[in-house]
Image (cartoon, rainbow, N blue to C red):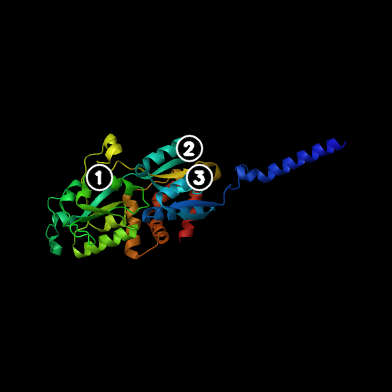
Amino acid sequence: MKKALLLISTLLFVVVLSACGGGNEGGSGEKSIDTITLADAGWDSIRFHNSVAQTIIENGYGYDTEVKPGSTAATIQGLREGDVNVYMEVWTDNIKEVYEEATAAGDFEKVSTNFDDNTQGLYVPTYVIEGDEERGIDPLAPDLKTVEDLKKYPELFEDPEDPGRGRILNAPSGWAVAETIDQKFETYGLDETMNNFMPGSDAAIVTSLADAYNSGDAWVGYYWSPTAVTAMYDLTLLEEPEYDEDTWKETKGTEFPPNDVVVAVHKDFKEQAPEVYDFLSNYETSSALTEQALTYMSENDASADEAAKWWMQQNEDVWTEWVPEDVASKVKDALK
């Protein structure tokens, strides 16, 4: 009799325990996570897209959200390990080996392509090559066309801390693309006459460019689109040989490869928040749409959240296609 009672008690305990834990498996309709964490790898466009996603996730689906800042390497590792749930801008070819390894291992997955019409590389203000008649600027280097040509112009792009040598602004040290620029320095022989200057942040690059542009001085450095910078300033991307996969892998001595910028999620996210997963699977913009928001941020000294709200009000036809009608209605009410 005692054994029978013990068996019944044990079975009842198991049933109660299973019932209490059912919500965490997603079977009862309850959320298996309460807070969705997005990555901030340090540039304005990812912050804008984070804010758009957060607005929809919080107001349309009822989840809390938070942002985890860090370098590209740290945030991608966070996505692999589950400390980050959602990554709104993975520049796939900038971290190609890691991206392919992580997706092959199933650590995270691409759910959509945010945009794929971007460019990146070494830019100069267009007046450096063509001049600017309205501003009274004569062409400073009319024969400058390619990245390799830069080594002929150390005096024009003089390093203020190292007279006689030029300065090229790289990406910040925490960005994966900085290593690519390092290798291009060696491949094109830029280090013969030019210094590879690594700024501390994106803001430092922008300040340097703005100061030079406003003064009509020569400037050369890494940048990319879509950004408010490339929308605001007339810049020319210096040429490189046409992209070739083998050459790129060996020396980086070509133009940057086509770079899908994707939305990725941790491997468990589909089960943790399936309705948000579906929303992110529909997320798609373009460089032009992204630059709208970035230009608004720059011209109005606005935060990413403020730019997201403005952009969503201006582009209701775009984002409402990503979500069901009832979700869109909730978000539109929140934007009023």
How many marks on residues?
3
Contact (Cβ within 8 Å) of mark 3 with mark 1:
no
Query: Label 2 crowding class (10 Å Cα cut-off): few <14, some 14-19, many 20+?
Result: few
| 145 on left or right of 198 | left
Q: Nearer the viewer, residue 59 or 106?
A: 106
Q: Is residue 189 visible?
A: yes
> Nearer the observer, disc 2 or disc 1?
1
Residue type at the position of mark 1: Glu
Percent position (x, y) of residue 19? 69, 43
Q: Which of pointers 3 and 1 lies earlier in the amino acid sequence?
A: 3
Tag 2 secondary structure: loop
Residue at horizontal 37 percent and vertical 40 percent from the top: 96
What mark, if any, has residue 106 been given in the picture? 2
Q: Does 224 sit above or below residue 255?
A: below
Mark seen at residue 186: 1
**Type of residue at label 2?**
Gly
Label 3 crowding class (10 Å Cα cut-off): few <14, some 14-19, many 20+? some
Judge whether 163 appears above or below 191 on screen: below
Which numbered disc, 2 or 3, marks the residue closer to the eye?
Answer: 3
Mark 2 or mark 3: which comes first in sequence?
3
Give the alpha-carbon distance from disc 2 to disc 1, as whole Å: 35 Å
16 left or right, relative to 318? right
Secondary structure state at the residue bearing disc 1: helix
Residue bearing the label numbered 3: 81
Question: Where, by quadrant of the figure, is residue 47 drawn?
Answer: bottom left
Residue type, label 3: Glu
Q: Secondary structure at mark 3?
A: helix
Q: How far from the left and from the top, in percent, is residue 203?
A: 33, 60
Given residues 171 and 23, the one toward you in this image is 171
Rate crowding at label 1 as few (under 14), some (14 to 19) or many (20 or more) other CA atoms within 10 Å: some
